[in-house]
Image: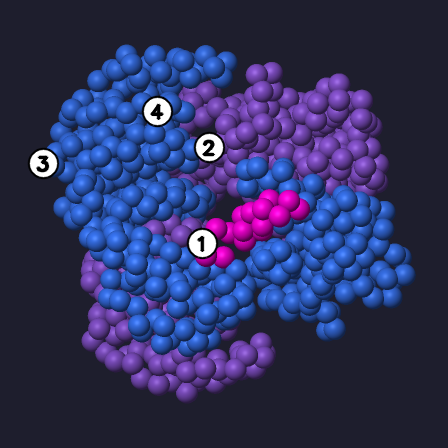
Chain colours: A blue, B purple
């Protein structure tokens, strides 16, 4: 069953907001066997909306729309839907009482704009919005479905999870199964990986498709199987996996598309280990990724972002001599940082990073992109030098990933 | 001049990758006076590609395409472009020598897949890719332009900045100017803000459009003016700003769409102040945002991510009594954390956060979303309680924003 997603909002077109909604929706829909055929983003413009609704409904049976239903004037999705479906806005007491309950909990007074949210199109089903004021509406015409939802990510996610996905699932019997399997691979640039596994790729059955998803330091291989026979799919994916593993060995660091922060978290938890980090060039990004995972407090003790040399000395105990003799970006300082944080936090595993993220601060000897990463696991320490690129944002992310990869590798080697 | 953006890749449709490219492109194009009329995302599928190229070129004069030109088999954009423009692939020695130079710098051997990247469509202009191997191609037919670029963000950004934007700018004389002005507003929910400034909004001239962009703790108001007369635009925007300021006063914390981390950074720099942070529930996210800004080492000393109570005690000097009597999530602990980090880092401004990000760990008395934020500026300290929502990711971001807002406010009050 094909689905199209329409995201509405000038802010998406002019790049003031990055659309993360449609990616989340695509993932969830896919897990249920729906295929997103196309995503389209348009501005808050009547003609564009009418044309997009019409084209999408002519192509597929299910159209999911987000955005443009806030209380303010620039939002025109609701009234344009009325025009498209030749209906009108009517006042809905149920919607108003839900808004009243919601606002009572937040201790906010309802104003007239919020009250206007209770005007909803006739000739559609109104689905409860449990987390916001914008009405969620489900239209059906000639066996085709169009659902309009808020653009606020957690309102959309709540509505999808609670109502829309279960309804779509119940409604459409899945004649085709879609199953993905992803392997996260380190140590290989994309083209080298492709050549290395070429024979394996050629041997995949027709109903399995392979995609390469390169990101800083990691290539994810995604197998997508589409077939009416679920057993056939599972047997074929299992066979593909079993023949891939010996080809790549330790370079496969995860048989999932979980980010490395989650893979590392699971390894720590499984082996009952604690983690602490000392970050210079990654500036808190490793700690942020680790703590974005719920439950991380079970294994993450904390960290120090030692941006200044003084913090490196005072908190982590890096010696003045090393800073002067070798510089803050050096093997010696990385080593003292990792020892310092391990001791300070009394952690089983410790990570330290020091480098030049750029765009300024590089020298001939230590150009932008020079990063030292140290990982300590109990008595064992590894220190590695990376020569990354020139882009600050990419360097911070890549250095964070490499550091977490190294830590995961050391835990795996020890506890496998 | 209208532009359409086509982003290609199955990974975008199934949500394995969030498309950040098109937002960046939209922003840059807009700054040059181009308007993105529509963005469309499709999979690596011949028929979809042909249909999207054809529809987009029938609607607008400039189509920018990203993705699907990597070295691996799943990428079919290059050959489908040949089919669409009725041409064929030919070997290009220049492209190969650029790849050789690039690889020599990285110390990687060129393999046959990489070598195949030097096959490019005939009857198009090949634009140098200075950061990767995929060829960038510029097609022109009947006065319409289609440009194909890599999907890797920094390769796309480099090509856009270096070649494609300057060429588009030189090519199209701008008969219409587009100017945006954004005000970042705190203290108001979206609908309350809309009512508060309703008369002001109604008095805006026809050629200025207002949009509300709500995000955690902040509503950005964006004015977009479109007119052939640039002086008229600037006068009108100035007038709008001058009448908005008295309405909102201190609630406008920035007359730009810069993120709060950048606003705070500028304030620190301007007033020659240093910053340090002690993060519990925000887990390094504040430090990450602060250090994402290049040049932040001039004012950011560092921070402590004190996830465990032991780290709070050992590093920040939070007392055992306070932790036991009031709990880690309390006014008292927030206060001791902020005093601890200010002293430890010898910072002029210090921020501390402690709270329950969720989804677990809440109690009746301290439900998920309870967050204490303390900011110290020299001898002045403010501690505030926030009751946020239930979504971990949103709580972390909201608490980070609120903490940086509070710090910016205290600096502004002191140094205005």
> In the image, which is nearer the foreground, mark 1 or mark 3?
1
In magenta stretch: residue A120: no
Mark 2, secondary structure of its residue: strand
Between label 2 and label 4, give the one nearer the viewer.
Answer: 4
Q: Is residue A267 magenta?
A: yes
Give the residue displayed 12% in from the left and 34% down from the top. Answer: A141
**What span is in magenta?**
A254-273
Tell me the quadrant of the picture where the C terminus of chain A can be found.
Answer: bottom right
Q: Are marks 3 and 4 on the same chain?
A: yes
Residue assigned mark 4 = A129
* Comes first in the chain, label 1 or label 3: 3
- The residue where tag 2 is placed is B214
Percent x, y of residue A201: 34, 71
Res. A279 in view: no
Question: Which residue extends farthest left?
Answer: A142
Q: Residues within 10 Å of mark 1 (few under 14, many from 20)?
A: some
**Residue A256, disc:** 1
Q: Residue at x 55, y 37 (%)?
A: A294
Which element carries disc 4, helix, strand or loop? loop
Question: To which quarter of the image does residue A383 belong?
Answer: bottom right
**Mark 2 to mark 3: distance in Å?**
36 Å
**Of callouts 3 and 4, the N-terminal one:** 4
Q: CA distance from mark 3 to mark 4?
A: 26 Å
Secondary element type, mark 3:
loop
Q: Secondary structure at mark 1?
A: loop
Which residue is the site of mark 3? A142
> How far from the left and from the top, in percent, is residue A266?
56, 47
Chain of the residue where label 1 is placed in the rendered structure: A
């Amino acid at each position: 069953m094909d689905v199209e997603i329409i995201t509405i909002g000038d802010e998406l077109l002019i790049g003031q907001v990055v659309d993360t909604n449609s990616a989340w929706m695509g993932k969830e829909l896919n897990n249920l066997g729906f295929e997103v055929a196309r995503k389209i983003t348009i501005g808050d413009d009547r003609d564009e909306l009418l044309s997009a609704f019409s084209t999408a409904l002519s192509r597929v049976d299910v159209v999911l729309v987000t955005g443009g239903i806030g209380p303010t004037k620039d939002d025109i999705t609701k009234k344009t839907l009325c025009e498209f479906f030749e209906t009108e806005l009517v006042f809905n007491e149920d919607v108003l009482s839900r808004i009243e309950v919601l606002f009572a909990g937040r201790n906010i007074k309802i104003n007239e704009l919020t009250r206007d949210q209770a005007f909803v199109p006739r000739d559609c089903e109104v689905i409860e919005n449990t987390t916001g004021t914008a009405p969620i509406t489900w239209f059906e015409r000639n066996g085709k479905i169009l659902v309009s939802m808020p653009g606020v990510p957690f309102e959309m996610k709540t509505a999808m999870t609670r109502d829309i996905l279960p309804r779509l699932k119940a409604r459409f019997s899945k004649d085709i199964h879609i199953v993905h399997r992803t392997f996260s691979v380190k140590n290989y640039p994309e083209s080298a990986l492709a050549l290395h596994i070429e024979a394996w790729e050629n041997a995949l059955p027709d109903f399995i498709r392979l995609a390469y998803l390169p990101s800083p330091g990691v290539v994810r291989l995604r197998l997508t199987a589409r077939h009416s026979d679920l057993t056939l799919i599972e047997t074929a994916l299992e066979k593909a996996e079993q023949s891939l593993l010996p080809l790549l060995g330790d370079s496969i660091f995860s048989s999932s598309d979980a980010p490395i922060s989650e893979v590392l978290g699971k390894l720590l938890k499984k082996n009952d280990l604690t983690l602490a980090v000392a970050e210079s060039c990654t500036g808190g990004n490793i700690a942020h990724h680790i703590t974005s995972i719920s439950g991380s407090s079970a294994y993450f003790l904390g960290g120090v972002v030692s941006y200044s040399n003084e913090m490196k000395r005072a908190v982590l105990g890096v010696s003045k001599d090393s800073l002067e003799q070798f510089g803050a970006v050096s093997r010696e300082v990385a080593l003292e940082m990792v020892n310092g944080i391990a001791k300070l936090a009394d952690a089983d595993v410790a990570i330290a990073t020091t480098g030049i993220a750029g765009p300024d601060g590089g020298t001939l000897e230590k150009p932008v992109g020079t990063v030292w990463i140290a990982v300590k696991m109990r008595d064992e320490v590894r220190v590695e030098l990376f020569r990354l690129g020139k882009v600050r944002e990419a360097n911070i992310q890549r250095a964070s990933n490499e550091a977490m990869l190294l830590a995961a590798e050391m835990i795996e080697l020890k506890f496998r």
